[in-house]
Image (spheres, coloured by chain):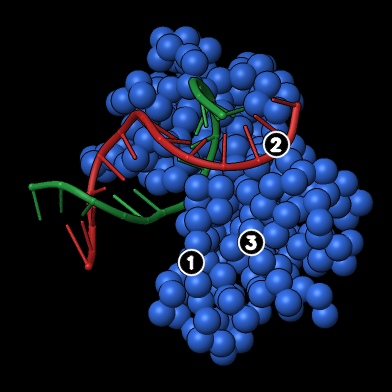
Chain colours: A blue, B green, C red
Amino acid sequence: MVRSYLEGHVVGRTIQSITVLDDGILEKVARERLREALEGREIVRVARHGKQLFLLTQGGMTMTIHLGMTGDLDFHKIKEKESRFARLLIDFEDGSRLEYEDMRKFGAVGMTPSKEAFVALKKLAPDALSIDRKEFSTRVLKHHKAIKSVLLDQRIVAGIGNLYADEILFQSKVHPASGAASLTDEEVERIHLATRKVLKRSIRVKTDFSKPPTSYLLRDRSVEAKCPRGHKAMRTMVVGGRTTYFCAVCQSPAMEIE
DNA sequence: CTAGATGTTAAGGT
DNA sequence: CACCTTAACATCTA
């Protein structure tokens, strides 16, 4: 969703200047180098791999952007006063501007010769939406940690975040703490299908949590909530250091055996 | 006021 | 190596 938003606004525009407001978000590149390499170049393509974004320039380097937890990109036709948490500005020659804001600064902006080089460097797994059933299953079954931790591990499958992992496991009726390696083939297949369904749907609704179908857990993330299938059994637990919501009825280990 | 949480990821320990 | 925990960060809420 961010990728298509950017594609519509920055492809074809030429970078006039880059203003780094906070060096803390730069990933292993000095602001001078970023500016030297990218200013004056036209953005010709916007790509995505998992949660990572790439702005490819004509005959030059590629800018990498990760939104982290609170990052956001806003395109403005004219230069307005930047927001409180703006960290980096890209001004284009036609007077428009792309603003990168990130309150908690878990995001990162960097530079790479190519998307492929960056993916290799970070050891990122194939993107969750490009991986077929067979490969998904091979990758998942290899690990012995909790299935939720596996889904969140960008080196096993790229592009799934905390909320989406919960949603995927709810839709698949699998308990988040189940050991990945001991899942049945059928369960893994359900998880693979749910991953595609949930991510595609989320991209379509632009991650607006009020818009997914009412059968989605994402709409109301709290223990007070009723599970979308009517059970009053929402539970919370910590898996792999991340808060996890699930329905104790739908996703009980007993249900998995059916 | 402090404690605890939060769309993430890298680094350090076992 | 596989896995787990924690720190970095800046707010907001109980």
Residue depth check, mark 2 versus mark 3: number of the one nearer the observer: 3
**Dot 3 lies on which element?**
loop
Task: Give the mark nearer the N terminus: 2 vs 1.
Answer: 2
Callout 2: chain:
A
Name the disc covering residue A236, or none. 1
Residue depth check, mark 2 versus mark 1: number of the one nearer the observer: 1
At x 70%, y 59%, the residue is: A178
Callout 3: chain:
A
Name the disc covering residue A74, or none. none
* Rendered location of residue A27, percent (x, y): 48, 21
At x 86%, y 52%, the residue is: A137
**Dot 1 lies on which element?**
strand
User: Looking at numbered disc 1 in the image, what kind of residue is underneath it?
Assistant: Thr
From the viewer's perspective, is residue B12 above or below residue B6?
above
User: Looking at numbered disc 2 in the image, what kind of residue is underneath it?
Assistant: Arg
* Rendered location of residue A153, percent (x, y): 65, 42
Give the CA distance from mark 2 to mark 1. 26 Å
Task: Give the mark nearer the N terminus: 3 vs 1.
Answer: 3
Asked if marks 2 and 1 touch (Cβ < 8 Å), the reply is no
At x 56%, y 66%, the residue is: A205
- Residue A163 quadrant: bottom right
Left or right: A180 with respect to A146?
right
**Dot 2 lies on which element?**
loop
Q: Which residue is mark 2?
A: A155
Quadrant showing the C terminus of chain A: bottom right
Q: Which residue is mark 3?
A: A176
The reply to whether residue A33 is visible in this rendering is: yes
Callout 1: chain:
A
* Rendered location of residue A65, percent (x, y): 52, 33
Give the CA distance from mark 2 to mark 3. 19 Å
From the viewer's perspective, is residue A165 above or below residue A158?
below
User: Looking at numbered disc 3 in the image, what kind of residue is underneath it?
Assistant: Pro
